[in-house]
């Protein structure tokens, strides 16, 4: 999927090599944690995998297509239909309730009202929030807000979920509960990639990729993924 990927940021005459010859394969049904110290290239990698940015060299295949050759509007379609994004700070719209936040991508996608209702309810059930439909973000806890964020990422039935530090703003117990949701989704067949700097969180996944100075320095199989207690 990712082959000899290199990303160089140029600012004037200054060059920063953010990723260097990174290669790995992501298979369907995988659940992967990306770990590494600050500045090791994790966000850059997520941006490229999320089709928000392109690599400087190397190739990235998404469902058989070489992403660096695609036009910007094709990339936007892939982002909106094929990739679900989950954010550390949830990125919910404060004036909309949980249902409306989750519904938004479906409105953009032109899905009819009756269909939307069904899909949104189903997504909120999947994350265990069916009793919070009409709560606004400021009436939700951090864990509940992140569940809304995950439900929103699910409604277009993306082929991959990308999450950048999804538990970064949560206490450890709530973080584990959120990881349990990702585990359930993965068991139902979702491919998931998440960035974390917490070993404990990464232990809930099935595979850990370690980055250092833009290089992939370790590819570790998690023998017995942790389950939330
Ligand atoms: P991480 O997510 O692991 O902290 P990043 O991917 O954000 O790492 O950064 C990798 C390197 O690329 C760092 O040295 C960072 O300063 C640099 N970098 C990231 N984004 C930019 C940018 N837009 N312009 C210039 N340098 C950048
Ligand atoms: P664009 O408008 O060109 O698609 P954006 O930077 O607005 O680019 O967003 C990039 C992608 O990130 C979007 O295509 C979308 O899939 C995802 N995204 C951004 N914001 C949200 C959001 N609030 N909810 C769900 N997905 C989002």
Image (tube, rainbow, N blue to C red):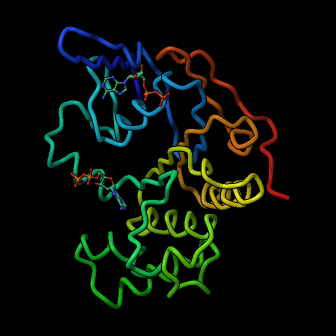
Q: Choose top left, top right, bottom left or bottom right for residue 176.
A: bottom right
Say which quadrant the C terminus sits in. Answer: bottom right
Q: Please give the count of numbered marks on the rendered protein.
A: 0
Q: Which residue appears at 55% of the width and 16% of the height?
A: 212
Q: Which residue appears at 50% of the width and 44% of the height?
A: 164
159 sits left or right of 201 in the view: left
- Place of residue 196 in the rendered image (x, y in percent of width and height, measured from the top left): 60, 38
Considering every residue shown, the one lying at the far front of the view is 138
Considering every residue shown, the one lying at the far bottom of the view is 114
173 sits left or right of 207 in the view: right
- Place of residue 217 in the rendered image (x, y in percent of width and height, measured from the top left): 59, 15
Q: Which residue appears at 80% of the width and 53% of the height?
A: 227
Front position in the image: 23 or 198: 198
Q: Choose top left, top right, bottom left or bottom right for residue 63.
A: top left
- Place of residue 145 in the rendered image (x, y in percent of width and height, measured from the top left): 55, 68
Considering every residue shown, the one lying at the far right of the view is 229
200 sits left or right of 59 in the view: right
Say which quadrant the N terminus sits in. Answer: top left
210 sits left or right of 39 in the view: right
Task: Tell me: residue 132, above or below residue 62.
Answer: below
Q: Which residue appears at 22% of the width and 76% of the height?
A: 110
- Place of residue 199 in the rendered image (x, y in percent of width and height, measured from the top left): 73, 35
Front position in the image: 190 or 39: 39
Quadrant for ligand 2 reads bottom left
């Amino acid at each position: 999927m990712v082959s000899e990927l290199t990303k160089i940021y140029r600012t004037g005459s200054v060059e920063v090599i953010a990723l260097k010859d990174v290669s790995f394969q992501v298979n369907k049904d995988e659940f992967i944690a990306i770990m590494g110290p600050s500045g090791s290239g994790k966000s850059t990698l997520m941006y490229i995998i999320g089709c928000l940015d392109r690599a400087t060299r190397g190739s990235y295949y998404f469902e058989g297509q070489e992403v660096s050759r695609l036009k910007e509007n094709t990339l936007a379609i892939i982002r909106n239909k094929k990739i679900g994004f989950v954010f550390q700070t949830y990125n919910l719209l404060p004036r909309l309730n949980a249902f409306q936040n989750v519904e938004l991508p479906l409105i953009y996608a032109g899905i009819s009202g009756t269909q939307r209702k069904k899909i949104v309810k189903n997504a909120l059930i999947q994350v265990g929030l069916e009793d919070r439909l009409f709560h606004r973000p400021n009436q939700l806890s951090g864990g509940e807000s992140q569940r809304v964020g995950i439900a929103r990422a699910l409604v277009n039935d993306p082929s991959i979920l990308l999450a950048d530090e999804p538990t970064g703003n949560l206490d450890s117990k709530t973080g584990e509960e959120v990881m349990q949701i990702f585990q359930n989704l993965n068991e139902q067949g979702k491919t998931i990639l998440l960035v974390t700097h917490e070993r404990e969180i990464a232990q809930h996944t099935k595979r850990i990729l370690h980055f250092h100075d833009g290089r992939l320095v370790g590819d570790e199989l998690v023998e017995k993924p942790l389950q939330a207690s």
